[in-house]
Amino acid sequence: MPKADPPGSKTRFLDVPVEPFEAVAGAPAEEILRRMERISFQGRNLAIAHRVWRKMLADEVLIFLGAAGALSAGGLRLVLARLIESRAVDCLVSTGANLYHDLHETRGRRHFIGSPDADDGALQAAHVDRVYDTLVDEDEFIENDNWVASFVTTLDRRPYTTRELLYRLGGHLWRETGRAGILTAAYRARVPIFCPAIADSSIGMGLSQARQRHPDLGHVDVIGDIIESANLVIRRPRTASVVLGGGTPKNFINQASVQAEFYRPGSGGHRYALQIVTDVPHFGGASGSTLDEARSWGKLAEDADRVSVNADVTVALPLLASALEASARADLEARRAPVFELEGRALAVDGGSLPVDRYDTERVEIF
């Protein structure tokens, strides 16, 4: 019988060696991430994120995707659209910026390569806006705002949750353009989108311009979003969270679990969680808060499989999503994703309508 390691022995710590990474011509993203599991720092964390996301897809969980910032302006809109189309995610929570910049390109406009050292006074004089190193035509944005306002005038004069509003906007955009994008992918795949800070965006500005045309237009029920997202967790309590960049989407996803637990104890928080963030926790902001901290709020299950990647999303996500395209193909084909009905005021999931304007305290289905 082998002897136990004596106290102070090193062998219980020095078990799995780091494997130096070797560059191989033509190596697929899946193989690169597999080998990165044996390197260190954020490279290893990114490889673990790939493994955690695959576990989500193999399990029967509802996967939230949070997209902060202006990832669409940064060139990632079709990556997000593909994750929606393939049902690698089930519900998107996004900033208005991501959706507006997506709308801009779906309508045939472009973003352009610029420089963070550009002459901003000259840009302003030319009606060119800058997002760090990316440029866009301000006059095209003004036309987009008017387009959004005109769309809103076609809607019934009543409040809309962002989920219902954005589903209708995606449908309108698809019928007009027939082009791929986040909004059109979500419309076609019947994936709900919530935008809890929609007023903090050019979509909100377009809504306000519709209100200028008639006072009964452009009313958005963001409190209804809170109720609806919590009811979704009540009905599908086994959840997972993928967060890109923190921000409002991160907290909105997590508070849905907290609110669901308040009204129907037993959901227990996300079973899986991964986040790709650049913010740090020691200034107290939600964007940089750790996943361990989230457990103290009941946002994550005690045994949740979780990983944080401290990296720029524009660096990490293209590699991660490319690897999933190959490694998760069988999981995606076999996956029983939630089935949503998004047309009306009431969101329905798996054939059952969620209550409107109140929490679902009467029944819960455990998956």
Image (cartoon, rainbow, N blue to C red):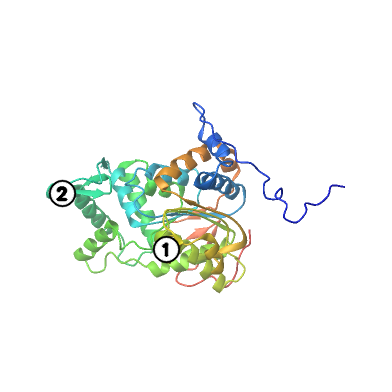
Residue 285 in view: no
Q: Nearer the viewer, residue 26 or 215?
A: 26
Position of the C terminus by quadrant? bottom right
Kind of residue at disc 1: Arg
Q: Nearer the viewer, mark 1 or mark 2?
A: 2
Name the residue tied to disc 2.
127
**Mark 1 or 2 closer to N-term?**
2
Furthest residue toward left? 125
- In this rendering, is residue 268 above or below 112? below
- The picture places residue 70, in percent across and down from the top left corner, at 34, 51
Furthest residue toward top? 25
Q: Residues within 10 Å of mark 2 (few under 14, many from 20)?
A: some
Kind of residue at disc 2: His
Mark 1 → mark 2, Cα distance in angstroms:
39 Å
Dot label at residue 217: none
- In this rendering, is residue 363 above or below 145? below
- The picture places residue 201, in percent across and down from the top left corner, at 29, 58
SS at circle 2 = loop
Residue 202 in view: yes
Q: Nearer the viewer, residue 116 or 332?
A: 116
Q: Nearer the viewer, residue 172 or 305?
A: 305
- The picture places residue 202, in percent across and down from the top left corner, at 27, 57
Dot label at residue 345: 1
Query: In the picture, residue 351 is in which quadrant?
Result: bottom right
